[in-house]
Image: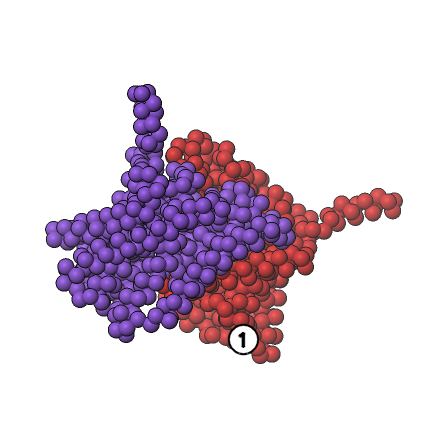
Chain colours: A purple, B red
Amino acid sequence: MEHSTEILLHLFIVFVAVQVGAEVAQRLRMPSVVGEIAAGCVVGSSVLGWIEISAPLEVLAEIGAVLLLFSVGLETRIGELKRVGGVATMVGIAGVLLPFILGAAWALMSGFDTPKAMFVAAAFVATSAGITARVLQEMGALSRTESRVILGAAVIDDILAMLLLGVVTALQTQGGVDVVNLLLVLLQAVAFVAIIGLVGARVMRGSSMMLEAPINPHSPLTISLALCLGLAAAAAYLGLAAIIGAFLAGMAAAETQQRHTLEKQLQPITALIVPFFFVVTGAKIDLGQLASFSVVVSLIVVTLLAAAGKLLGCGLGAWSLGRRGALIVGTGMIPRGEVGIIVASLGQQMNVFGDRIYALIVAMSLLTSVIAPPALARLLAEPDRRSSNNADAGTGS
Amino acid sequence: MEHSTEILLHLFIVFVAVQVGAEVAQRLRMPSVVGEIAAGCVVGSSVLGWIEISAPLEVLAEIGAVLLLFSVGLETRIGELKRVGGVATMVGIAGVLLPFILGAAWALMSGFDTPKAMFVAAAFVATSAGITARVLQEMGALSRTESRVILGAAVIDDILAMLLLGVVTALQTQGGVDVVNLLLVLLQAVAFVAIIGLVGARVMRGSSMMLEAPINPHSPLTISLALCLGLAAAAAYLGLAAIIGAFLAGMAAAETQQRHTLEKQLQPITALIVPFFFVVTGAKIDLGQLASFSVVVSLIVVTLLAAAGKLLGCGLGAWSLGRRGALIVGTGMIPRGEVGIIVASLGQQMNVFGDRIYALIVAMSLLTSVIAPPALARLLAEPDRRSSNNADAGTGS
């Protein structure tokens, strides 16, 4: 009885904090996600200590991230994503290479041996699509070319990051890399994405009737949510991020006739559950770890390197979109979020590095997640400078 | 990573099982809740063993029950509930007394000493409003007089059951009852229900504007959900069932101008989360415990006593509604659900009784929850016999 009271109280605190945080952020003309992460930080252990991250809260956060990417997928048409496939691939590859090189250079200079430096560098790589997706959704920018490039690149980024993690993990434990196994892993991941992305969409296009077959009046929604949970679990089983599966499920559901009903019905659900993802992200920030001057300096260096790696790498990959488009894509790929935290936890468990580096990587992952949204929102809100430049040029001539 | 994969897989299994169960039940013309509980039983440890009840699943189930009663409260007007206050009070009191007497008689005859028999009897008392509420909602019967009596009586029932549990617990541990403390507990509970039920509704009636104040377009929903979680936590803190708080929050929200929007937005949320409550209820049924003949006989006796206690007690209380109305109210109060399970767990922890009685009470609680819904659905679906009898009499004369 008392345990359940405590859980309800925590849910209440989290839910109220997140609404207040979002409201304050929006009044300050910032994306609500910044306020939600900040709210988590405030009610979390390092400031007020009103909540602690329990397994149920973690699962709610996970469901929140899954539902968020499902709703983003629902606003993404596979045809439009394919149109930016080339650019997205270049963004994904360059956005993995450059942060990896910068991360490895920093780790080598910090005194790690080569295998360990490779592992640290892997934590610099993976982008967390959730935070950027939310900003894009909130700004009504999901139909922009840059948004499609970011979402496509996030899928490729995740596949590459998973492979990379496989390689660097193998380097630690066996001293050698099992190429055949890695190729198998790669093949599985690519096959999963290709089959769901291409065949799944086609199947869903023809099965709108089937969604209405059950007696349950909400059956299009419940069947789609089942698909979402199933593909999220399948993606996680293959070593990909669960949210990639949820995103693909959303894209498949977007091909059905019921997509607009689904979008509408999903809104109250995401309003309830998605904030848990951001508040838990915020509650994981341990401000106490950052109390010393040298740590703060290291953190700034690491965060700048991590941000610069994505900004330059992804920006170069998206150069064909113009300077501002490249800047939007690069900024959108900066947040590391929970993916960086997962790699850091793995490294700590495997004794690749100690508590200090762990705290640094976690703080970097969260810091990149906090600095990117306001920058991205500003870039998206600005009137397109290229076109206004053109207009100026027109007036001037 | 692997842990999170497993959780996602469990969520997927639970979600698919519950949809299939509900669909099968509805095709067999049974309330979907029966199919959902059965689905939980099938995927649970005693049949397929595909899922186990983890803390996150328990919390999802709890949130499901809370949201269910919130949505039921949203369809209940405080004015209409007050109109049946007298009948509901009689139903609540008689529905506590008779099951308690029958339970105590059975326990005394089974060889328990008086204090322990009182505790066993307490497990016969509390009604779980969630299961009945769902059936009433599904049959579109929430506006019937019988439904209002059931909901009002469930609140009174819960207050009395909590007091009774306080008394019997005190009997075990101290050998004496602290009357002053119990009166304080009673006062707190009654004050909570009265304040929220009366003042809360009035406050909400005047604050429809406030719900629209935040920037968030879903603010009427998010503020109402915050109220729901807050009052659920408060009710649990006072020793009442959390769902009583959620029900009161729903009734308060029903007084706002946005009630129809809230109802509509809540539907997809409850479609996603409420089934977890029923599937977890079903997954707790341990069929292995019921494998011996003597246990089955005891279980049948206990379940019949528990059902008869409510049917007669509540039926007598609701006699003014006519024979069929009394039957509906009595049947609706039969399910013990999670409340009986909570009392049983407490008794086991306090060594009042052993594993066999624990299993019996749990099985009785679940069995009453499974047998009541189809009976209730049949009673609700039947054309009113009183009026058809009158018509027959008219033809005969």
- The residue carrying pointer 1 sits among few (fewer than 14), some (14 to 19) or many (20 or more) residues within 10 Å by Cα, namely few
Identified by mark 1, the residue type is Gly
Residue at the outermost left position: A293
Residue drawn at x 24%, y 59% as measured from the top left: A121
Q: Chain of mark 1?
A: B
**Viewed as shown, does residue B327 lie left or right of A386?**
right
- At mark 1, the secondary structure is helix
**Viewed as shown, does residue B187 lie left or right of B364?**
left
Residue at the outermost right position: B397
Residue named by callout 1: B288
Observer-nearest of B255 and B188: B255
Residue drawn at x 58%, y 43% as measured from the top left: B84
Tell me the quarter of the image containing the N terminus of chain B: bottom left
Tell me the quarter of the image containing the C terminus of chain B: top right
Q: Say above or below: A365 vs B298.
A: above
Q: Position of residue B386 (x, y in %)?
A: 75, 47
Q: Position of residue B166 (x, y in %)?
A: 42, 59
Observer-nearest of B22 and A162: A162
Q: Is residue A128 visible?
A: no
